């Protein structure tokens, strides 16, 4: 097991589109274990493989209070979404210290494979709905700040680049 390094916006690697997993094998399960360890250590409620510079369609989520209900999504797809949207104040481990409002469909139905390669379908609402949409965006190379105004995006970029220089 290993805690992996999380890429930080505006790293261009966050905009790569992840490729589907063709076989859920032991290597994928090892990636899932490392991603879970990384998510719990951060701590965060979700993590997409893109964020650890692995461009495969793998997501882990745990929105439980006790942090003991890991959800694994391989090749997740939104197969249905509600008409009505909800605004939520989002954050991202790849955009540390930045929180802003994003509007997304209130409820989504997701189809994916689990860590054994078994297909499942999950109806998501509330925080889980926000999180799975945020994570699938990462797999498609999208970071939540891209829903904000150009002005906010450029302010966030300079703030994070400045912070990066301060630690370098
Ligand atoms: O830990 C996280 N919290 C969070 C809060 C509101 C909306 C989305 C998220 S996901 C984030 C972890 C992360 O960056 N996943 O990609
Ligand atoms: Ni994120």
Image (spheres, grey):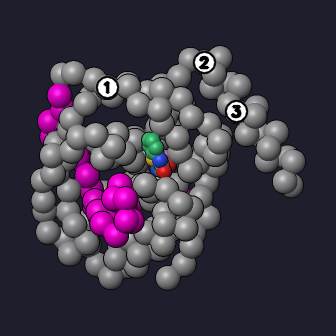
Which residue corresponds to the image point at 82% horizontal and 39% vertical from the top-left?
A: 162
- Tell me if the residue at label 2 has its CB under 8 Å from ligand 2: no
Which residue corresponds to the image point at 12% horizontal and 53% vertical from the top-left?
A: 121
> Dot 1 corresponds to which residue?
86
| In the displayed structure image, the side of residue 19 where residue 123 appears, left or right | left
- Tell me if the residue at label 1 has its CB under 8 Å from ligand 1: no
Q: Earlier in the sequence, mark 1 or mark 2?
A: 1
Which residue is more in the foreground, 46 or 34? 46
Which residue corresponds to the image point at 15% horizontal and 51% vertical from the top-left?
A: 122
Residue 40 is at least partly visible in this image: yes
> Dot 3 corresponds to which residue?
157
Give the mark toward the camera: 1 or 3. Answer: 1
Q: CA distance from mark 1 to mark 2?
A: 22 Å
Which residue is more in the foreground, 140 or 87? 87
Quadrant for the C terminus in the image: bottom right
| x, y percent for residue 144 | 49, 34
Which residue is more in the foreground, 13 or 97? 97
Q: Quadrant of residue 59?
A: bottom left
Please give the range of residues in magenta: 53-82
For the residue labelled by badge 3, is the local secondary structure a helix, a strand or a loop?
Answer: helix
* Relative vertical location of residue 124 with respect to residue 1 in this rendering, above or below: above
Direction front: furthest residue: 65
For the residue labelled by badge 2, is the local secondary structure a helix, a strand or a loop?
Answer: helix
| In the displayed structure image, the side of residue 138 where residue 164 appears, left or right | right
């Amino acid at each position: 097991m290993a805690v992996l390094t999380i890429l930080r916006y505006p790293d261009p690697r966050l905009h790569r589109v992840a490729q589907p997993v063709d076989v859920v094998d032991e290597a994928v399960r090892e990636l899932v274990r490392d991603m879970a360890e990384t998510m719990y250590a951060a701590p965060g409620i979700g993590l997409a493989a893109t964020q650890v510079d692995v461009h495969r369609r793998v997501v882990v989520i745990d929105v439980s209070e006790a942090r003991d209900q890991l959800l694994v999504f391989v090749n997740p797809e939104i197969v249905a979404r509600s008409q009505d949207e909800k605004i939520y104040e989002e954050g991202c481990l790849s955009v540390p210290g930045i929180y802003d409002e994003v509007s997304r469909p209130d409820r989504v139905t997701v189809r994916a494979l689990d860590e054994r390669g078994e297909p499942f379908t999950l109806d998501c609402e509330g925080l889980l709905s926000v999180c799975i949409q945020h994570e699938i965006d990462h797999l498609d190379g999208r970071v939540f700040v891209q829903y904000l105004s150009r002005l906010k995006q450029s302010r966030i970029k300079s703030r994070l680049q400045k912070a990066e220089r301060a630690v370098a």
